[in-house]
Amino acid sequence: MKILLLEDEYSLRISIEEFLKDIGYVVDGFTDGLEAYNAIYEKAYDLLILDVNVPSLNGFELLKKLRLDEQTMPAIFLTSLRDVEDLKEGYQRGCCDYIRKPFDLEELELRIDQALASNSEDDSPIIDLGFNVEYDMKKSKLMHDSVEVVLRKTEKDLLEVLIKNKNAIVSTQMFQDDVWGEYVEPATIRVQLNNLRKKLPETVIQNRRGLGYIIER
């Protein structure tokens, strides 16, 4: 599970990062709202933890932009704000939870567990890719016209990265980070993607020359 953490208070950010990594999460920490916003379109995150008062783009506006872009990953706000109107604004922007500072890290863990569980219950594992193509995220099974399409493990991993980043371009660097986790030749990534594309209707995965690949739905 990958978590994006936006928090500009150094000591708190480091404490949260270390705690979440110790309990098994992959965490990317940011201090600037605009940098965090851009990162969300470069990697697939399962959860966002957002401080409200941060430079460039505050947490409320960041989440508002994401929801307008139909990005639906769960988000938890961290804030020292106390006014009930701020609480209302957080939920209106599309968060699933709101934690007031100071807080115990164990409480944050419980809130994260709840947010991820609720999101999993709401989302169907069957992803419609159009052209009579569906992918079952739980079973890692691809169906075309109700017939299973056999995929190799790397092909499944590539497809799942594209699905998690639907409507956003996925670069070869993103595939490298999320699928291999280490350096591989760009040509190797392109060959694997071309093999995957041959098993699908032509327009399911589109190539944006010089940028990457995208599934638009």
Image (spheres, rainbow, N blue to C red):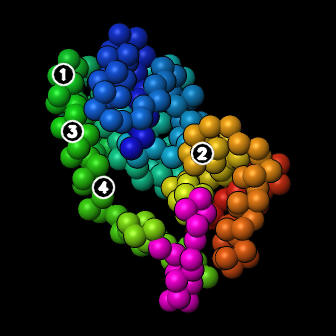
Residues under numbered marks 4 and 2 in contact, where contact means CB atoms less than 8 Å apart: no
Q: Which residues are magenta?
A: 141-155
Image position, residue 17 (x, y; %): 37, 23
Q: Name which residue lies at 34% across and 21% down.
A: 18
Residues under numbered marks 3 and 4 in contact, where contact means CB atoms less than 8 Å apart: no
Residue reaching furthest top? Answer: 11
Residues under numbered marks 3 and 2 in contact, where contact means CB atoms less than 8 Å apart: no
Would residue 164 be seen by someone viewing this image from the given angle?
Answer: yes
Mark 4 vs mark 2: give the one in front: 2
Mark positioned earlier in the residue sequence (3 or 2): 3
Mark 3 vs mark 2: give the one in front: 2
Q: Name the amino acid, label 1.
A: Phe
> How many angstroms separate mark 4 from mark 1 (CA)?
23 Å
- Residue 196, quarter of picture: bottom right
Which residue was labeled with disc 4?
119
Numbered disc 4: secondary structure: helix
Mark positioned earlier in the residue sequence (3 or 4): 3
Mark 4 neighbour density, 10 Å: few (under 14) some (14–19) many (20 or more): some
Residue 76 located left or right of residue 56: left
Mark 2 neighbour density, 10 Å: few (under 14) some (14–19) many (20 or more): some
- Residue 78, quarter of picture: top left
